[in-house]
Structure formats: structure tokens, C-alpha cells
Amino acid sequence: VPYPLQPSCHANHAPPYLAKIPELKAKGADVVAVVSANDPFVLSGWSRILGFGDKILALSDPDPKWSSALGLDVDLWGARRGTRS
């Protein structure tokens, strides 16, 4: 997730996952989660706005150490956005 409240992510990336929760659960998913290099307060507010409830777990990776360990980080310091997941 680049930025939770950025229009592309807010309107285009997250809602399709929310809509597909029943399909993902039918395929055996126990947990559906999104990970973002934002602080937990931003993710908490964003997940409430989108209505994730108990359907999608919003995980904060602000450093982003976890994403980096998996090779899922991108260096956007040149664009003044830091390292993102």
C-alpha cells in the first residue's frame, strides 16, 4: 500500500480486496491483511474509513523492516517519500 489515503490506493487498491473477502475465505484464507509503511494510527483511521472491520487486518510496518526483509520495499527517498512497502 503506497499511501492509505492517497486517491489511487484509497479508491482503487483496497476496495477490491474488501469486495473479495468471501471469495478469499472460500479458498481457505484465514486472515486477509494489508501492510503499509505508515504508523498504526494512520492505518487504524484508514481501515475504519473503508469499513475493514474484522474482515481485513491493517498492519503497520513504519520502518519498513518486515517489508525490507521480504524484498517488498521500494526506495522513494528521491521523491521525498522514504522507503515504502
Image: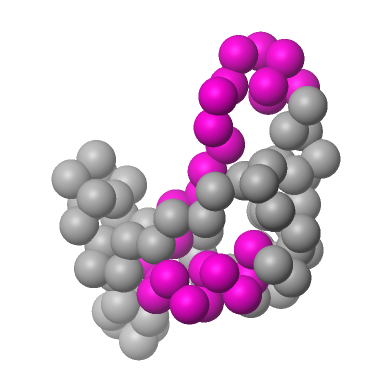
- Whether residue 8 is visible, yes or no, is no
Whether 57 is drawn above or below 1: the answer is above
- Whether residue 80 is visible, yes or no, is yes
- Side of 34 where 48 appears, left or right: right
Task: Give the x, y percent position of residue 14.
Answer: 68, 53
- Give, as a single range, the part of the protein colored magenta: 23-47
Q: Nearer the viewer, residue 2 or 75?
A: 2
Q: Residue furthest bottom?
A: 80
Q: Residue furthest top?
A: 27
- Side of 32 where 67 appears, left or right: left
- Side of 35 where 4 appears, left or right: right
Which quadrant of the figure has residue 6?
Answer: bottom right
Whether 71 is drawn above or below 5: the answer is above
Whether 43 is drawn above or below 32: the answer is below
Quadrant location, the C terminus: bottom left
Which quadrant of the figure has residue 84?
Answer: bottom left
Colour scheme employed for the rendering of this structure: one colour
Q: Residue at x 55, y 24 (%)?
A: 30
Q: Residue at x 52, y 77 (%)?
A: 42
Q: Residue at x 70, y 54 (%)?
A: 52
Task: Give the x, y percent position of residue 69.
Answer: 18, 45
